[in-house]
Image (cartoon, rainbow, N blue to C red):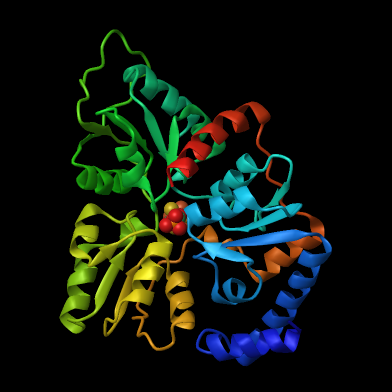
Amino acid sequence: MTSEEIYRKMKARLAAFYSDEELRQKAEIADEINQLKQEKNAVILGHNYMEPALFLSVCDYTGDSLELSRKAAKTDKDIIVFCGVEFMAETAKILNPEKTVLIPAQKAGCSLAESVTAEDVRLLKKQFPGVPVITYVNTYADVKAECDLCCTSGNAAKVVSSLKDRAVIFLPDEYLARNVARQTGKQIIFPKLRAETKGKSEHEPDDQMIGWQGRCEVHEKFGTQDIADIRKQFPAAAILAHPECSPDVTAAADFAGSTSAMIKYVEETEASQYLLLTECAMGDNIAAAYPKKEILRMCRQRCPHMEKITLETTLNALKYRQYVIEVPEDIRVRAAHSVERMLAIG
Ligand code: 13P
Ligand code: SF4
């Protein structure tokens, strides 16, 4: 596709989000990225939260964390440019140790990944010996290495149910854990972490989920009042929430699911309007992809980490081979076990 063709494609879908001048500039950058991608034998994976111009023009694959992990596991390209946050790029590296994995911005973090350390997991394991540890994919490699199994928002309940154990440790998202506990019929507890564990744990876990109090700084801001306000104004609107929202919010919404599950819901249903309680770039991407659907544009939550990934930073990533993701081999091997176990469950 030439720069002019990219511009026309962007103009047709994204005129509501950018000025004409911005679209022309972005089309030129996208054209340069696409050429470099060919020259360097690279693949670009783009999370559903990427800004619309990037999402539409340069990604070979787009999707939620689970879908992108699957694509990363299968690619035969030499370079993976991960347009998402660091834990996602790290997951791609864990699955592809011999490939170069690039993330276009340094410090594209995640409040959930930052909420728990490998040492925290080691202490929890001492406190609850023998209890399997499931970690949300929104964690860093050293945490994944301490765990038995990973999950994403797309398969968390399935992963928990796949274990025969009646008790599980589920890290680090408090709200996802509460949502999954409700789905799987488990009681959830949030024990105090103890540096020293003498003898038996203070809780005898049985049909319990042992949680952690990490939160997504974007999704924790949505409340049931947001839903009540929308229902008053648009009674027939379908309200969708990501499971990183509180259980009160997911219970009051019409649908809760991963970012791709939400996209599928919009695609397959016929509501008069849709409201998405998630990161706002995704609402823009859905509005651009389904112009006949009315997406309520009341969004105010942009992820400050996802926002660092732009067409401009992606171009620099390919031009200057930056920023390279490295994972120490001993950690990678153990983390790969958790991620691969998850991919096998589906
Ligand atoms: P998904 O796996 O649903 O895409 O979610 C990732 C994420 O970070 C949501 O905030
Ligand atoms: Fe992390 Fe929340 Fe941003 Fe997703 S939206 S990357 S969970 S901070």
Identify which residue is drawn at 51% across, 56% down.
67
| Residue 114 visible in the current orientation | no
Q: How many dots with numbers?
A: 0
Give the image quarter of residue 194. top left
Q: Where is residue 24 in the image (x, y as percent from the top left)?
A: 69, 87
Left/right of residue 75 with respect to residue 346 in the rendered view: right
Left/right of residue 237 with respect to residue 54 in the rendered view: left
Left/right of residue 62 with respect to residue 317 in the rendered view: left
293 over 220 or under it: above or below: below
Identify which residue is drawn at 51% across, 39% down.
339
Q: Position of residue 252 (x, y in %)?
A: 18, 63
Identify which residue is drawn at 34% across, 75% down.
268
| Residue 291 visible in the current orientation | yes
Compare residues 203 and 305 and report the one nearer the observer: 203
Q: In which quarter of the image is the N terminus?
A: bottom right
82 over 52 or under it: above or below: above
State which image quarter holds ligand 1. Answer: bottom left
133 over 11 or under it: above or below: above
Give the image quarter of residue 228. bottom left
Compare residues 53 and 334 and report the one nearer the observer: 334
Q: Residue furthest toward the right?
A: 39
Identify which residue is drawn at 63% across, 51% down.
74
Q: Where is residue 313 in the image (x, y as percent from the top left)?
A: 69, 64
Q: Where is residue 247 in the image (x, y as percent from the top left)?
A: 23, 53
